[in-house]
Image: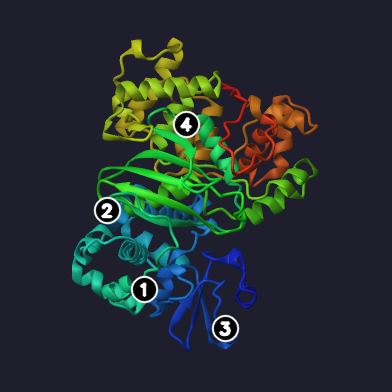
Amino acid sequence: MIDDETRYRAVDSRDARFDGVFFTAVRTTGIYCRPSCPAVTPKRVNCTFYPTAAAAQGAGYRACRRCRPDSVPGSPEWNHRADLVGRAMRLIGDGVVDREGVAGLATRLGYSSRQLQRQLTAELGAGPLALARAQRAQTARLLLQTTELPVTEVAFAAGFASVRQFNDTVREVYDRTPSGLRTERTVGRRPAAPAGGLSLRLAYRGALDSDHLLDFLALRAVPGVEEVVPGTRPGVRTYRRTLALPYGRGIAEVDGLGAADRPTRGWLDCRLVLADLRDLTTAVHRLRALFDLDADPDAVDGRLGADPVFAAQVLTRPGLRSPGHVDPHELAVRAVLGQQVTVAAARTLAGRLAATYGAALPEPSGGLRLLFPTAAALAGADPADLAMPAARKRALTGLCAALAEGAVRLDPGVDREEAAAELLALPGIGPWTVGYLRMRALADPDVFLPGDIGVRDGLRRLGLPGDAKAAAAAGTAWAPWRSYAVHRLWTAAAATPVTSQASLVTPPVDTRVQETA
């Protein structure tokens, strides 16, 4: 917890590490800013601090047109917390309020709408409707300034129920009409949008090791569903994949950093093609989770770098992230496929299932031609199509049936302990699979996998004992960031040098994973 005096010092020093953690409202100007706003620092007596943009808007403040506080990274607190507020924020970010209303959000969380309103307001200064409204306003600004869509279409694509509500919100939040916001667009600062799509930036804080992210995703890329390819800028790699979204399909492209880009640049370029623009908010939220862009790398690296085991690696590779996923059901299937086999073998199995049971795109896009099959489709898969031992076949089809029926939930608002217990109750699902899913599907920052062969190999390479018991003991020192320690150990096990951003590299090591039942 930080107090107001600490917040003001962050504002006075324009400390970007606090962007998204809190917002500064200035009484004399009537605007609210991110802490790193380049404007003249206001006097302390004129500053009020809010935990969310929605709270500042609810108090009558408008978004600063200079620092764009609505486009900051999400707070790492809401991203990782496992309590009601953290779970609610993740579901709101995924667009649940827009699709299902506050009642639907409350039902997913197991609380009444009144209880939910009270807890969110007490901690965040705004209820679920206000939080969703602030998110819709940011989506509307993005569409107005990056597309040529008619204003009426922007209103409904951003999630507003009426054009009047859209106009009133934009005027209140930005002190501009929608047409006025559109005229403020910047030209030439972003790569051109793909045909029928849009271009945007995914903000992050601190340093980002995009080589690690792209190496990790490239090694596991399912043929036809995802790929890592040379980017449009020299020396840049691009991750591309298909997306199954609430209203339709999509294709996403995210560029890594180039050789000349600073790790602390603050954003990744992204391009989206969506069948239905109402999926924009959800698509962005899921990509942010995939790349772990709401993390606080200074806190993580500060903890891990203080240990001699990781000190040198943190110094040479700051900003290592713990990748999430865009679809927890897909990840669950792939986790079972990865039991007791190499990463390459699991990727091959996933590719075969996608080719057999996945929905084809109307038109291929590069190497992308498929959506990953749904849990319902795989629950009824022909056993002959599952090239794996009988026990793992039963584990896969049982898991898919439980996901399809809702007996096991892995959505962003699920209670992690309940989900873990439900998964462990399924035949063939052991601690490694549950831990892997907690780490990637449920954004748990403090998962350790002592039985994983890659973790144990990494420990040995760093001079520590590599047996499972010793690994578990070593991991206690890295709480509450053990998920990040796992990725650093996997990096050490692969012994991959810091690759040039200019090269298209697939890591040479296939790390085996160990299911410890």
Amino acid type at circle 4 is Ala
Kind of residue at badge 1: Glu
Q: Nearer the viewer, mark 1 or mark 3?
A: 1
Mark 3: secondary structure: loop
Find residue 146 and report its horizontal and vertical position in percent.
Answer: 34, 61
Q: What residue sits right under mark 2 in the picture?
A: 278
Mark 3 vs mark 2: which is more N-terminal? 3
Q: Which residue is mark 4?
A: 221
CB-based contact (under 8 Å), mark 4 and mark 3:
no
Report if residue 415 is visible in the image. yes
Which callout, 1 or 3, points at the residue further toward the start of the chain? 3
Give percent across and percent down for residue 128. Answer: 35, 62
Question: What element does badge 2 sit on?
Answer: helix
The residue to which callout 3 is attached is: 40
Q: CA distance from mark 4 to mark 3?
A: 47 Å
Q: Are marks 1 and 2 in contact (CB under 8 Å)?
A: no
Nearest the viewer among 236 and 2 is 236
Residue 184: mark: 1
